[in-house]
Image: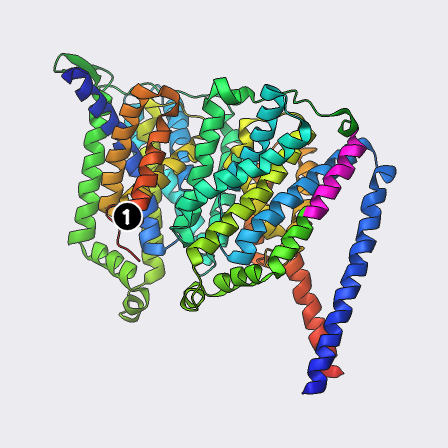
Amino acid sequence: MSIEALIMQVLSGLSTGMMIFLIAVGLCLIFGTVRVLNMAHGSMYMLGAFLCFWLTSILSNIAGSFWWTVILAPLGVALFGLVLEVVLFRRLYPREMIYQLILTFGVILLVSDTCKLLWGVEFHLVPYPRPLNKAVTILGALFPTYNIFLIIIGALIFVGLWALMRYTRLGRIIRAVTYNREMVSALGVNVPLTYTFVFVLACWLAGLGGVLTAPVSAITLGIDATILIECFIIAVIGGLGSLTGAFIGAIIFGLVNSFGILIAPRLAICFNFILMAVVLIIRPWGLMGKPE
Amino acid sequence: MVIRTQRKEFMKRIRWSSSKIWLLIALAPLIALPFLIGEGFLSLAIEMLIMIIAACGLNLMMGYSGMVNFGPAGLYAVGAYTTALLLVKTGAPFGFALIAGPVAAAIVGAIVGWFCVRLTHIYFALLTLAFSQLIFTIAYEWYSFTGGDNGIVGIPVPDFLAPIDHYYYFTLAITIVCLGLIWIIIHSPFGKTMQAYRENPERTEFIGIDTKRYRLKIFVLHSFFLGVAGSMYCGFNHNVFANYAHWLKGTDFIIACLLGGMYNFFGPVVGAAVYIFLEKLVMSYTEYWLFVLGFIIILLSLFLSGGIVGFIAEKFSTIRVKYDTQG
């Protein structure tokens, strides 16, 4: 393989990885803080993608309609997440795991059939937004500018989240809640509010992921399940509940995927399954996680 | 004290024999069923029976050992695909293909389980789901072998099973055998150990039980029963599709367990029957069955966590307590 082709493959892997990172990190955040595995997280992503399609077609005569969507759609998803958390999920935290899983699964079904009702079962496409609809030349090969943009956004979000967790009061509270919920509560921190905030932030990220992925993939029903499984793989590789783990896991996932496609185009996901199995045998708690 | 224990023993014996009688009474209408209802309802009954096998097999794992397999559909599909491929590609005898299905599911279950039992709790559930999606991907994408999204259609079935009432009796017999086996497993020392593990994994390990091996055994056993259900469904439907392995199919089984109540032997039986009935009923009115199912799931997990049988048992036990205190 020539060096140009290699770099192309790495770049496309990175852009896939960065997109999935936006969704996987939300899953990890919720699990790390609230200790609930939110199966409906993929639905937030799907909702974001559908909202993106819907808003861009409504706002199509406004210049830069896509960029308005980038602002509006994640907010919509976050709002939906807020309602969901306050009305449903809050009752769920003290319950057995199977009921947490099954209730969040119920939400998947509701969201999926609502999307079917509103937007139908066909494929939807969103065009590349201006000014990122061109390609740049890297080492003599053409590469879409939009994918470069995705890589940069993913890295920025990671740095932002890391800084939020590390340097702000809010981040300290979230980390403290993760560590010992009762003690933090005794110190006068409003723990349920922290949970709500984390949940809404994760939903916003998933919505953002959905919007930003819309131009590079087809929007249709069923993408919620696909992305959820991919997030699970990343979470297991990186370590559930770890921010850095999600980032590294996402990069590994993207790279394995983009090189796997060269070997077996339709079965590329299998390589990641194998990788996950290997990680589970060597480090069952994931690369960045801590053993329980 | 002695009298009390004796009375308890006696009551137990009575309850056991009366439950036997109840079983026989319940069996009579099931045997008479083909004479009472039409073909459409009979095929519904067959679907219920197959669902009962799958749900009870899954409950061995979920209810009795406390391990959540979130991807049972993968193993179910392995059973179905093995039977289908053997019948279509090699022309193997039906009986052989029907036995090979569950055996293949158990073998795949042993491989998947070997990975999964290394993890516990949520990680275990995640990994089972991921493996089931892996099986789905293989079934969906490997066109030359599994037929991809076209599935395998027109699976030959021997003539004596072709009439629907014959297949009904066949399914009924298999279901009774499977439920009997599950009953024996649960009430054996092995089953008691399973339940001990569910109640307290650490203590079970402290008294010298190799929990990992036990869990793997349960995994293989439950794969076998899921495989039986898959094979039976393949013979019933004469077609096999990739979405048998999809997680939506898998959650059908889980919801059937939960709906009936997973801490009771007959919970999944009731749950499976009610679930299939509800599904057909709602689907005859609207194509948005999943929407309705979503609501059912949310209500179920918020308000009816013991399931239908659990709910009835609870009401019944409060009545009995009242009666006992009065007497």
What residue is drawn where x is 51% and y is 64%? B196
* Magenta residue check for B325: no
Viewed as shown, does residue B201 lie left or right of B55?
Answer: left
Q: Secondary structure at mark 1?
A: loop
Name the residue at the bottom extreme: B1
Image location of residue B130, percent across then percent down: 42, 39
Q: Is residue B72 above or below residue B143?
A: below
Q: Is residue A193 above or below residue B141?
A: below
Viewed as shown, does residue A161 lie left or right of A96?
Answer: left
Name the residue at the top extreme: A140
Image location of residue B200, percent across then percent down: 46, 65
What residue is drawn where x is 19% and y is 20%? A6
Bounds of the magenta segment: B163-177
Q: Amino acid at mark 1?
A: Arg
What residue is drawn where x is 28% and y is 25%? A258
Query: Depth check: A159 or B81 in front?
Result: B81
What residue is drawn where x is 38% and y is 39%? A77
Query: Depth check: A219 or B120 in front?
Result: B120
Mark 1 nearby-residue class (10 Å; few <14, some 14–19, many ≥20): some
Q: Circle 1 sits on which residue?
A: A283
* Magenta residue check for B167: yes
Viewed as shown, does residue B64 lie left or right of B216?
Answer: right
Q: Chain of mark 1?
A: A
Q: Is residue A87 visible?
A: no
Q: Which quadrant does the N terminus of chain A fall into?
A: top left
Which scheme is used to colour this image of the protein?
rainbow
Assign the magenta stretch its main secondary structure.
helix
Image location of residue B7, percent across then percent down: 74, 80
Name the residue at the right extreme: B35
Q: Which quadrant does the C terminus of chain A fall into?
A: bottom left
Q: Is residue B84 above or below residue A38?
A: above
Image location of residue A42, percent across then percent down: 40, 38
